[in-house]
Every structure is written in C-alpha cells, then in structure tokens.
Amino acid sequence: MSVSAGFVLLCEFLQETVTPEAANLQSHLVTILCSATTAWVVTWYLLRERKHMIDLMHELRMLSSVVEHSPASVVITDKSGNIEYVNPRFTQLTGYSPGEVLGKNSRFLKSGSTSAADYKKLWATILDGKEWRGEFCNRKKSGEPFWESASIFPIRNLGGEITNFVALKKDITERKEMAQQLAELSYLNSKIITDAPAGIAVYKTSGECVMANPAAANIVGITPAEFIAQNFRNLESWRRSDLLKLADESIATGNPRRGECHGLTVSGRQHIWIEFHFCPISWNGRQHLLLILNDLTGRKNAEEKVHEQAALLDHARDAIFVLDMDSRIQYWNKGAERVFGWTAAEVMGRSTIDLFFGGIISRDLDLAMRTTREQDEWLGELKKISRSGRMVTVQSRSTLIRDDGGTPRSILIIDTDITEKKKLEEQFLRAQRMESLGALASGVAHDLNNVLTPLLISVQLLKEKTTDDDGRRILESLETNVKRGAHLIKQVLAFGRGADGERSPVLLLFLVNEIEQIIFRTFPKAIKFEFHAPRDLWRVIANPTELHQILLNLCVNARDAMPTGGLLSIEMKNLVADGPVVGIHHEMPPGKYVAITVTDTGTGMSPDVQRHVFEPFFTTKKLGYGTGLGLSTCLEIVRSYGGSIHCYSEPGKGTAFKIYLPANVTEPVAGNLPEPPDLPRGHNELVLVVDDEEPIRTVAQKTLERFGYRTVTAANGSEAVALYKRDREKINAVITDMAMPEMDGIDTIKALRSMNPGIPIIGCSGLDHRTIKTSVADAGIKHFLRKPYTAAAILQILNEALAVKVAR
C-alpha cells in the first residue's frame, strides 16, 4: 500500500472514531506525526496492524494531552503565518485567549526589538524546510515585552508540501534579564578595574602576573605590558623588603596581608611610598594572589609636612586646637597643654563645652559659636576652666574651616592666655580709681576736718567746765563720735594718697600686747585668742600707729566673721626669701621679711568676694557696720612699706590674711608707743591765729587763752599780714591754715617770713600732709598740725615751736 493510501485510510479512521471537537487538533497531530518517513511508517503500521488501532488512538489522545499541558508555548500557523492553534501555556504567557489570536498573523505579537533582517532570515530558513532555532522579543497583551527561545519547523503533507509551521517557545525573560545584569556587572567590574586609581594585579602562586590594570603599572612607572611580564619572585625590591614574605604568608595562610614599601621608581627619578594589600583568591579552580597597590607618596609627604607644621605649632606659646562641627577636639598642640594642663591624649574627641565650661553654654560662648558659624570667624575674650580648676582668661580667635565644596568641616581655635594681663589691667584700673578717689577725698577731708576741728576742741573745753555726770557722759559720747569721724577721714586720706607718718624701727611684739588688751576687753568671750611669735622676731621700719591700725582692723573683721564665736590667732615669724616673693598686688625682691598671719575660723568668703575685698567702699557688712575702707587702707599702708598682703579664704572654713613686711635687723628699736605728756601751758605769749573758718578761729582762741596764751585772729592771709605788720614786735608765734581764699597759707607764710625770718609758724590743714608736703617744705615750715586736732595737739606743737625759738 502506498503512503498516500495509508494516510487516507488513517484520516478516514480518525474521522470515524474521534469526536468532532477534537478533529481539528487530531488532524494536525496526525500531520505532524506522519510527516516524511514517520508518516509512512505509521500508516503502514496501522494498515498492517489494524487491531492495534485503538491503542494508537489512545497514544494520540495522550500526546494531545501532553501538548495541552506542555510548559512550552505551542503555536501552529498556516504557511502564511496565520495562527491556527495555540495551547493553554501560550494563553497563560501572553494573556491572549485562543479566540483573540486564531486567524491572526503571528506578526502582531512582535515587540519591535527584533530586527527586520533577523525575521527575514527566520522565514527564509523555515520556508526552505529547515528548522530555525533562536531568540526574539514579543509583546504580551498588556504591552509588556518578553523574551522567548523558539524552535520553529515546517509541517509537510503526504505529498511533501509545506502546509504549516509549528513553533515551540519557552519564556526566557528572566534568563535574559539575568544575562543582561551579568553583562552589565561584568562590564562594570572591568571598568572599575581598568579605571581604578588603585593598582590591581593578579599573580599565580609561582609569581607570574596574569592581569594588571593601568594604575598598577603607572604607580611603579612602567607600562602594563612590562608589569605583566614581571615575576614578583624575581624582583629585587620584593626580596629586600618584607613584600615577598608577606605574599608567601598570605598564600600559605589564606589570609590577607598588608605592607608598605619606600623606594625608587623604575625610572629612578622619584622616591615613592607604596602600600600593598595581598589577598588569596581562587580563579578558574586554581589559587591566585590578588595585589592591590596604593601610591602613598602624596599622603606621606603631606603627613611629613603636617608633622613639621605640628612641631612648629608645638613651639607656639598660644593654645592652638581644632574642633569638629560638634565641638569635639581633633588636634591639640603643646601650647594648649601648657595653658590648660591637659595632654593631647586626654582631650582628643572630648567636647570643649564639657571640658572648658562644665557643659554650660554661657551668653558669651553662645555668641562666639553663632558668630563663627555665621561669619566664619570670631574674636573676643572667654573664661575657661583649666585642668587644675583655675579660671583662665583667654583672647580667643575662632576660624571656620571649609572643604573645597564650601561645606564647614572644622573650627580652628587660637587662645592666648591673658589672665595675668587682665590682673594687671584690674590693678591699673584700681590704681586709677584710687587716684581719682584720692583727689576727691582730699577736698572732702579738708572741709570735714574744718567742721570737726572746732567740735573736737569745744568738747574738750566743755568737759573741763562740766561737773555733772550726765553732762560729762554726753560730752564724752560727742567726743567719741567726733574722733570716729576724724578717724574715717584719716582712712579716706590713707587709701586715697597712701600712708603717711614718721617711720622708725618697730618691734611688733609691743603692738600685739596692746591689741591683745583690746580683744580681751571688748571682744565677745566666745572668741578665743592665740598669739605665736619667736622671741627674736625681726623689726620693721614703719609707723607704729599705722601698724596698730592694720592689726586692729584685721582683728575687728575676724570678730565680725565669727558671730557665734571661734578662734582668732595672730602668728608672726621671720622669713628669708631666696627668690622673689610673689604677692597678689606686686612682686617683692628676695630678702628678709616679717610674715604676719591673722586667721579666724569664721564664715569665710567666696572667690568673687575675695576678688573685690581690697577695693575701697566694698563691704559685705550690714549698713552702718562697715565703711569698706578698712582693708583698702591696710593695703595702701602695707604697699607704702614695700610689702604685700594676701587673702586666703573658703566659705565655711574661715579666712587668713598674710602680710609680708621688709625686715630691718640693724636699726635700734623704737619700743612701746610713748605715753602722752601733760598738757603744756603758755606764759602770756601772743599767738596770731589765721583761718578762714570762724568756728575754728574761735575755739582755737578760747583754747589758747584758757592755757595761758594771748591771741589775735585773722580771717585770711591779707588780714594776717596787715596785723603782723602792726604788731610784729608783740606776736610770738603764728598758726595759719594752708588753704584760704584771697591769699593762701603758702603766700601768707612767705610774706610773714619776709618781715621776720625767725618767727615760729605752725602750718595747719585738713588736707593730707603728703599732698602739700613739698609746698610746706619750700616755705620753711617745720611744724605742721593736721585737722581735726585736739586741744592737746595744738598746745603741744605750739610749745615745741616756741621752745625752738628760745633755744635759738
């Protein structure tokens, strides 16, 4: 039987046994299975073995089921490409149902990604009766492109004519995307290796180079070809350094190794630093060694320059340090260590806000930080805490450092320690204030002394005339207050113009005896007193009254600081200073000193109070209990002796005042203060009293006349000169004020001396003697009476002046 006859019989059989719905599919399957030789064999087999026909149909149904459930997409078209069949996988993959594609040309699935030339080649292949295998991109119903791997082959009829084409397609979109990613990654890796600034090379363990990028060759100054031609085991530079050892260790252990090498380039023209990183890798199933090279020459040179600059900065006296934008320390020079006390290791990474300011951002610090960030720099003064807790005043300059892109990266701080400078400025300002106050005090003291002089003399005269006890008590109270006022004026003059008075060698032991009696008589019994001093205590050149004033003032302050009682002690000792004695207010030269310490166990003082304690009119006492002049007066007296005074105090732990006075070990001792003599009386001498203040003239006149003198008075210098011209043979002495209108005391004295050079003249003034000392000396005045004066004072000095005249 011929092939065509068998084929016809098979078709008739199928038509009789297969349902009409499957007839179309079965017809195509038979066509496929029976193509060429296969068709002939099947036909022959079916005709010969008709009894097996039912088994064959069963196999055909199985084959149909396989196609229906195939994971591959199956498309059957006619010779023109019009779709005649698609399986469920096609629908699942493309989103098109069979009804939407049957009868349509398969070209509608094209995405446009496959070129026309590729499609032309495809059709040429299958029309030539050959199978085509390849890949192309189609488009789903949603418009999404997808890639397919396809096998397309023709189907022939029994006559050998091509009637259909069958396409078996598999979705390879994921694989294509992965391949694309791998390709891009491969290109990226290749690009990275080629363009990397770091040198990259791969060696066999034997030392042969199998790959090197241009940077590796450029770093060592050779071409890539020359680099690859090298075997590192033959390189002298590797054998001389640790590089060969590190490479072998990395290969042996399987662990990375790192090293540095300093040498010459191949050209020999440049010294270079190279950093090596060795890392074992597996490549093509064999062990290799990856080498990464970095040129450190620029960094090493920069580091060397930085080290040189840092060494120079370490010689700077200023504190220089660098902060990050969070105020944390990144650099700290030796100057900063000297100024603040911390080493670089102790402060690196720490916040300056915590370090210098106790974590508190003050108004000044906030202004400095904001100005630096907004205006790129700030200059001003700040107080910073050192490691020892000492407050350091600095002239600080902050500069904002930006990178090449203008972004703030760090802050440079340069601090100059001006603590001592500020102290000197404070002392200078204090001296200026003292000078101004002194000028004011002299004028005020003159007027007040003129007011107090008649009061003091009048009270003393009234006491002699008053016999009842109440009257005497009132006068004594009045005298006490007048003297207190005079004492205050004297204090004003003392701090304003400095201490005054005759000086002689004084043994301080005598003064302490008097102070001790005052303490026992007037201080509360709850205050205990102790005194310690060696018997061979040195003497000092001073005014006993002024020293008495200093000690009494300090003891009274100690009493007021111990309202509930405590211990008051005075200690005196000899001190030999080999080096300068540094004082609070000035530095004293080496030498011998007497050190006096007055200590109490009272309430103590805060550091802020201690800074102001020597300022005039500064006091912590209640109104009416202190003038604020005591310690300022003590300071001026001590400084006038070339000494220094210190204050040491802590709140709740008491206070100690230390005084250092230059010692005198050669002059004789003045001894105790002399007892006041009995009031001398006159012998009917005529005294001219000159003063522009009428009350003073009156009381002076009454006092002198009460004690045996006769008097004549003048209200100014002109009047005094006229009176003296008239009665110069009768006038035995002159007492004249130094500050008067019309004709002052100096001109008056000169006029009187021109008429009688030997006339005893006593100058009198409410001004400080030091203020007019030069003028008095030029006028030849040897006797001076300071207002306010007592009756005893005027009588005593008048008696001395007249005695000098008699001696002549």
Image (tube, rainbow, N blue to C red):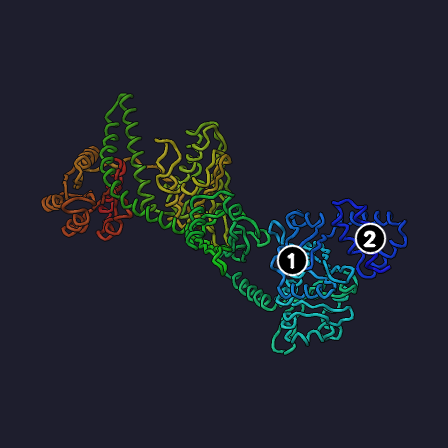
In x, y percent, where is residue 47?
87, 54
Q: Mark 2 is on which residue type?
A: Leu
Give the camera-side residue of 585 and 508.
585
Residue 717 visible in the shown view: yes
In x, y percent, where is residue 89?
71, 49
Between the C-alphas of marks 2 and 1, the distance is: 39 Å
Q: Is residue 163 above or below residue 594?
A: below
Residue 661, labelled with which disc? none
Relative horizontal placement of residue 142, taking residue 562 as reference (left or right): right
Give the camera-side residue of 189 and 117.
117
Q: Quadrant of residue 732?
A: top left
Residue 418 visible in the shown view: no
Question: Which residue corresponds to mark 2?
Answer: 10
Image point (68%, 76%), residue name: 225
Quadrant (top left/top right/bottom left/bottom right) for the N terminus: bottom right
Q: Is residue 42 above or below residue 701?
A: below
